[in-house]
Amino acid sequence: MRSITDTPQLSYLLNPLLRRSLGEARLDLVSQVHELIDQLLAEGATLEQVATRLQMPARRLREQLSQANVRFNDMVNDRRSQLAKRLLLETDERIELIAERTGFSEPSTFYRAFKRWVGETPVEFRRRGRLQAAERGPV
């Protein structure tokens, strides 16, 4: 019995469609994972938590993210970094609270991670951001 893709013309037409469909499904999964990470960030946002919400085994989620050339830990760190930067620049929240809101149980761990992400401490980042905003003046 022949497969539909055994016909060269059909294969030529269907392969790009299948590849595009798979790519879109991977992008959709990445978007869903980003949303869930945002929701779960204060709790730590583990692979297991996200997989449970997506109703799939953690191993399968990791494999599917790998096929999309994305690592779960990188996604979590990216979201943590973005949220931390936004909170430091846009709020007066204590750094300890920002550490907690971004999923760190200890402020010292947050300080080290932030310095690794940005190259400066949260205090330095906030101070520099506020100085730059003051130099620009009101918008």
Image: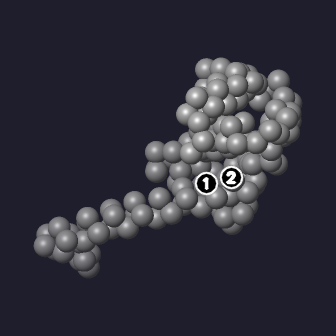
Q: Would you identify the image quadrant in which residue 109 lies?
A: top right
In terms of image quadrants, where is residue 85? top right
Q: Is residue 1 left or right of residue 106?
A: left
Q: Which residue matches tag 2?
A: 37
Helix, strand or loop for disc 1: helix
CB within 8 Å, label 2 to label 1: yes
Left or right: 11 with respect to 65?
left
Percent of width and height locating residue 2: 23, 77
Foreground pick, 15 / 30: 30
* SS at circle 2: helix
The residue shown at (73%, 61%) is 52
What is the count of numbered marks?
2
- The residue wearing badge 1 is 34
| Residue 8 vertical position relative to residue 52 in the rendered view, above or below | below
Pinpoint residue 37: horizontal percent, then vertical percent: 68, 52
Residue 110, relative to residue 63: is it above or below?
above
The reply, left or right, for residue 62 in relation to residue 84 is left
Vertical order, 56 against 3 (above or below): above
Residue 112 seen in the current view: yes
Q: Quadrant of the C terminus?
A: top right
